[in-house]
Amino acid sequence: MDDVKVKIPNFLGTYDLKAYLDWEMKVDQIFICNNFSEEKKMWLASLEFEGYALVWWNQILVDKERLRRHRVDTWMVMKRIMRERFVPPHYVREMHNKLQRLYQECKSVDDYYKEIEISLIRANIEETNEATMARYLNGLNREIQDVVELQSYNNMDELIHRAVKVEQQLKRKQTYKKTSYTYSSWKDKDTSKKKGSSSQHLERNSSREDDGFLPPEEGDLLMVKRLMGNLCKDKDNMQRENIFHSRCLVNGKVCSLIIDGGSCTNVASTRLVKKLGLKTTPYPKPYKLQWLSDNGELVVDKQVLLIFYIGNYVDDVLCDMVPMEAGHVLLRRPWQYDRDVVYNGVTNRYSILHKGKKVVLSPLSPSEEFEDVFPQDIPHGLPPLKGVEHQIDLFSGASLPNRAAYRSNLEETKEIQKQVKGLIQRGWVKESLSPCAMPVILVAKKDGTWRMCTDCRPINNITVSLTLDDHLYHVRSVLEMLRHEKLFANRDKCTFCTNQVVFLGFVVSASPSG
């Protein structure tokens, strides 16, 4: 190594914690490769100081000499002095907190481990291999964690390799399943609730149904699917990225229906065929599919003749039987060609000539799918006690916040008292004995009245966060549970899949300038 010339990086003395730690680690690596004395290491490192760092270090040496204190004559002493200046005293505590709250979320399993490892090194934490494996496994995304914890591993490297393999498998599976999110029509917003029911229902229940506008079939789905929509876009672009998603009746059962012209085969779900006991026929020319299979190539060798109803519209279509989770029935290019379908890309509607009349198939909106959850008048009283109570997962060791009420003027105080009294009279709230207390605030509504909201920011800070897919699945689970338990919600106070909200008088959006 004597013939190798290595340049020590410059240090400007900026108050950048990461820049200093990276500089210190780089210099340590250089000194390991060279047999320098401790004093020479100190002088070599100081030679690369520039700007504020140079002035500050010279002043340190002058003060040591003037006050006749112990001289700085080793690299270790120099590092200690520099850490006192450029590393805040709360840094180690923050790194400990970061490690406690570190989860994989949107990171890859490899990047997630690298972040754990860097945090352990930066915080100077030494823990056993078993402790690190437990920390890593606990922070993995649930779908990866559930598979990995069933496998055997003896060290950290084996655990990472298994997690990487599971992650790659999930990515292959989601190649098709991710497109199922765009099949949902959850981007449709309610635009006329104040006039009674939605405008589409007004059209469908009035004379417009005679003009051919047919709603999706209503009722509980034959099988519950993990199917949600993407985040909502601007109102003018609500249907821009949506694929048509509706409902139909097959053998008297409500099934999901998707129309997508991007493929050359009509498809029926294997689960649908088995659930309804539909008769299948051998496929005359079997073929293989890769994109719909979770485990390699899939041989499609069966067909089924489906007869489905959407309002007064009745149709039969020959479908290939394929295992899929996107929906129960997928109508594609052959159906559109055979029926001479006209598609309106702006409204996302399909027009068909049926028995001499024009029939228009409209997509399904979230409010229509769960209309029974949003009645006009919500019943009084609390719902009956259930075997499983609601719970919120908090960070381990976090203490429950207990905040005092915000100051308010006389008008605001009366409004809060009025709303609380109304809630008590309806039986919707009762006195709480919980040690956790959050203040309430009043937010102006569009009609000039006030909405009482709870400021949950302190509890949100210690709540375990979920991924976007978890949130989307959770919304659907909540709505389905409300329906099952005969519970209700106020549609006027609900907004689904929006890209901005009004909070404390401010518009909060995904846009950096929002």
Image (spheres, helix red, strand yellow):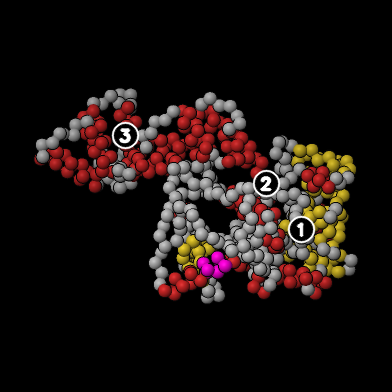
Secondary structure under badge 1?
Answer: loop
Instruction: Using the numbered discs, state the Cα–Cα distance from disc 2 to disc 1 in whole angstroms.
Output: 25 Å
Residue 188 visible in rendering? no
First-in-chain label (3 vs 2): 3
On the image, the x and y values in percent for residue 429 come to 55, 61
- Residue 292, picture quadrant: top right
Instruction: Using the numbered discs, state the Cα–Cα distance from disc 3 to disc 2 in whole angstroms.
Output: 48 Å
Q: Which segment is the magenta one?
A: 419-425
First-in-chain label (2 vs 1): 2
Q: Identify the disc placed on residue 80.
A: none
Residue 100 visible in rendering? yes
Q: Which residue is mark 1?
A: 219
Q: Which residue is mark 2?
A: 177
Dot 2 crowding, Cα within 10 Å, few <14, some 14–19, many 20+: some
Q: Is residue 315 above or below residue 451?
A: above
Foreground mark, 1 or 3, reads 1
Secondary structure under badge 2?
Answer: helix
Query: Would residue 161 be found to the left or right of residue 299 on screen?
Result: left
Name the kind of residue labelled 3 in the image: Val
Query: Would residue 33 be found to the left or right of residue 240 on screen?
Result: left
Question: Is most of the magenta stretch helix, strand or loop?
Answer: helix
The residue at the point 68 percent across, 46 percent down is 176
Query: Would residue 254 be found to the left or right of residue 378 on screen?
Result: right
The residue at the point 38 percent across, 33 percent down is 125
Question: Which of 422/12 is in front?
Answer: 422
Question: Which of 171/384 is in front?
Answer: 384
